[in-house]
Image (cartoon, rainbow, N blue to C red):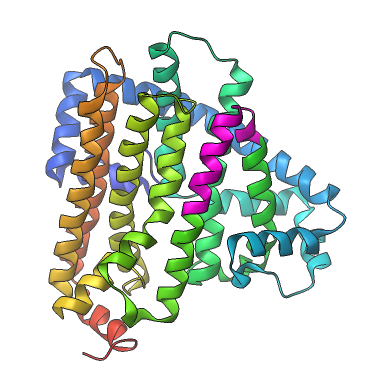
């Protein structure tokens, strides 16, 4: 399995959850889904370094060739509708610093250290191969790499943006991240455009939806007690739109696979979002605002119950993702791969929920919530 924290998929961790035990059982029996998943995991572990190198080189060229970085940043922040992403310091100094390839490499590797990036890189490769087989066509390696790279980079853009807005990680690098965001988006768009107009259009629509989700997220940070279920559904567009669009475009935006991949990846993304909120709460010692645990805690006034309900919410998302598998054509060769993928997603959430209950830092969470919403 792939994640930013290897312990999550260690043998000890897998034994601790029902889904993990099923994963171990399938590994022992060498099921088709396990063999397919392992093939792409191993394949992309070798390719990830090459991807990172391509990404860093593209960023470097964008940075050093831009003579008007302030204009670039202003255009980006206007598009995404968030002045918080605008660098207020000395832009020339930041550009000079990030023009050092070693410093740039460090920042890129930090934002690539993301569950959404590491868990989806092998998945996108499997989906695009499965789609090519289903449509009985070959795709040039350059086009294939461009489409996969572009969507991974687009997903990776959410990492620095979230860290800037949340201010809960890499605080000393936030100015660097503000500077990099516009160039990351430029590179993603350029690569995705190599997939054709239909693929590019699908991405732009998804990116528009993701920006709306990011806007709702920021609004809820400023007014936490205004949270409700509709706003949380809107907030989760930041997962649903980006991941769903990437799934759609692994089929080069062609039905029926485009719609099926969209449903599966969008709902799997929302499911992992719940797990991320549990993991982040444990690691940061505070419930994220906004999040499903925060929403449920505000309404039930019971922090432990709030996390239990968050797990139930994640299971609902995963059931919707599994609907995608039932929609697949009978002769689609990656069916078992997706079933196994959803097992790993289930394990990821169950594992962090179990860790939460072992440590049970619920008093700290209550104090955290009391700072923004008196109970």
Residue 104 rendering spot, x and y as whole percentages: 70, 51
Residue 7 rendering spot, x and y as whole percentages: 32, 48
Q: Which residues are magenta?
A: 191-209
Which residue is at a point 40% across and 29% down the rendered structure image?
A: 258
Residue 173 located within the stretch drawn in magenta = no
Residue 235 rendering spot, x and y as whole percentages: 38, 62
| Extreme residue toward the bottom, this view | 374
Instruction: For residue 4, say whether it is visible.
Output: no
Tag count:
0
| Side of 253 where 54 appears, left or right | right
Which residue is at a point 30% across and 15% down the rendered structure image?
A: 333
| Extreme residue toward the right, this view | 67
Which residue is at a point 14% across and 37% down the rendered structure image?
A: 21
Q: Where is 217 relative to 362, above or below?
A: above
| Quadrant (top left, top right, bottom left, bottom right) of the N terminus | top left
Examine the residues drawn in magenta and state their main secondary structure.
helix
Residue 153 rendering spot, x and y as whole percentages: 57, 43
Q: Where is 293 relative to 210, above or below?
A: below
| Quadrant (top left, top right, bottom left, bottom right) of the C terminus | bottom left
Q: Quadrant of residue 190?
A: top right
Which residue is at a point 15% across and 46% down the rendered structure image?
A: 17
């Amino acid at each position: 399995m792939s994640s930013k924290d290897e312990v999550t998929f260690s043998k000890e961790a897998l034994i601790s959850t029902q889904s993990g035990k099923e994963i171990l059982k399938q590994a022992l029996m060498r099921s088709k889904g396990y063999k397919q998943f392992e093939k792409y995991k191993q394949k992309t572990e070798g390719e990830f370094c090459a991807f990172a190198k391509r990404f860093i080189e593209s960023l470097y060229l964008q940075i050093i060739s831009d003579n008007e970085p302030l204009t670039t940043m202003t255009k980006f922040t206007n598009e995404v509708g968030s002045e918080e992403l605008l660098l207020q310091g000395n832009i020339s100094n930041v550009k000079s610093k990030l023009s050092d390839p070693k410093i740039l490499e460090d920042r890129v590797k930090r934002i690539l250290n993301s569950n959404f990036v590491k868990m989806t890189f092998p998945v996108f490769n499997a989906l695009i191969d499965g789609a090519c087989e289903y449509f009985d066509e070959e795709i040039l390696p350059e086009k294939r790499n461009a489409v996969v790279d572009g969507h991974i980079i687009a997903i990776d853009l959410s990492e620095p943006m979230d860290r800037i807005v949340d201010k809960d990680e890499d605080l000393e690098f936030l100015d660097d991240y503000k500077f990099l965001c516009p160039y990351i988006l430029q590179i993603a768009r350029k690569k995705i455009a190599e997939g054709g107009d239909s693929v590019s259009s699908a991405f732009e629509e998804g990116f528009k939806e993701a920006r709306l989700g990011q806007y709702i997220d920021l609004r809820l940070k400023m007014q936490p007690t205004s949270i409700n279920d509709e706003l949380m559904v809107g907030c989760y567009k930041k997962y649903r739109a980006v991941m769903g669009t990437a799934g759609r475009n692994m089929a080069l935006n062609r039905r029926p696979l485009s719609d099926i991949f969209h449903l599966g990846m969008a709902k799997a993304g929302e499911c992992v979002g719940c797990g991320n909120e549990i993991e982040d709460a444990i690691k940061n010692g505070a419930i994220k605002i906004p999040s499903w645990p925060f929403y449920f805690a505000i309404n039930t006034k019971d922090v432990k119950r709030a996390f239990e309900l968050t797990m139930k919410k994640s299971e609902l998302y995963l059931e919707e993702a599994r609907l995608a598998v039932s929609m697949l054509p009978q002769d689609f060769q990656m069916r078992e791969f997706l079933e196994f993928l959803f097992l790993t997603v289930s394990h990821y959430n169950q594992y962090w929920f179990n860790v939460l209950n072992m440590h049970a830092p619920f008093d700290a969470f209550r104090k955290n919530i009391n700072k923004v919403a008196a109970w």
